[in-house]
Image (cartoon, helix red, strand yellow):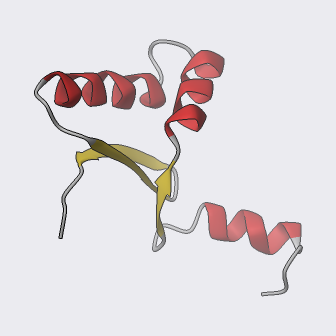
Amino acid sequence: MQPGNKENDAQMIDDPNVTKIVNRAILEHMAQVFGPDSTAAAVLAEAAELERDGHEVVFYRRGRELWVDPKTNH
């Protein structure tokens, strides 16, 4: 893959074998754009529950899948 090649970059973004951390601001923007029934909005709601229970959270994506997990300190 060559840097700056948009076709290769797009393939990497949606690669179902690559898990990446996602910034909360990106999820908030996605929830605004796609609405309250979007996956991003559901993930943010789940994060709010975890945070109310005292957890710090980390957002992830793999391909087009989004999820939130409590932050662990290893």
Residue shown at the point (53%, 44%) measured from the top left = 23
Residue at the spot x=57%, y=33% of the render? 25
Q: Residue at x 59, y 36 (%)?
A: 26
Vertical position of residue 57 compared to residue 41: above or below: below
In the picture, measured across the screen, residue 20 lies left or right of residue 59, that is: right
* Residue 44 pos. (x, y %): 38, 27
Direction from residue 48 to residue 34 in the image, left or right: right
Which residue, as the protein is rendered here, is positioned at the far top? 36
Residue at the extreme left: 53
Residue at the image point whose x is 46% and y is 30% from the top: 40
Q: Position of residue 11 (x, y in %)?
A: 69, 69
Q: Decide: is 25 above or below 32.
A: below
Number of dots carrying numbers: 0
Q: Nearer the viewer, residue 11 or 50?
A: 50
Q: Is residue 6 above or below residue 43?
A: below
Image quadrant where one finds the C terminus: bottom left
Place of residue 30 in the rendered image (x, y in percent of width and height, measured from the top left): 60, 28
Q: Position of residue 52 (x, y in %)?
A: 17, 21
| Left or right of 15 in this view: 56 | left
Does 32 sit left or right of 73 as displayed? right
Nearer to us in this view, 34 or 57:
57
Image quarter where the N terminus lies is bottom right
Which quarter of the picture shows residue 17? bottom left
Question: Looking at the image, is 17 positioned above or below residue 30?
Answer: below
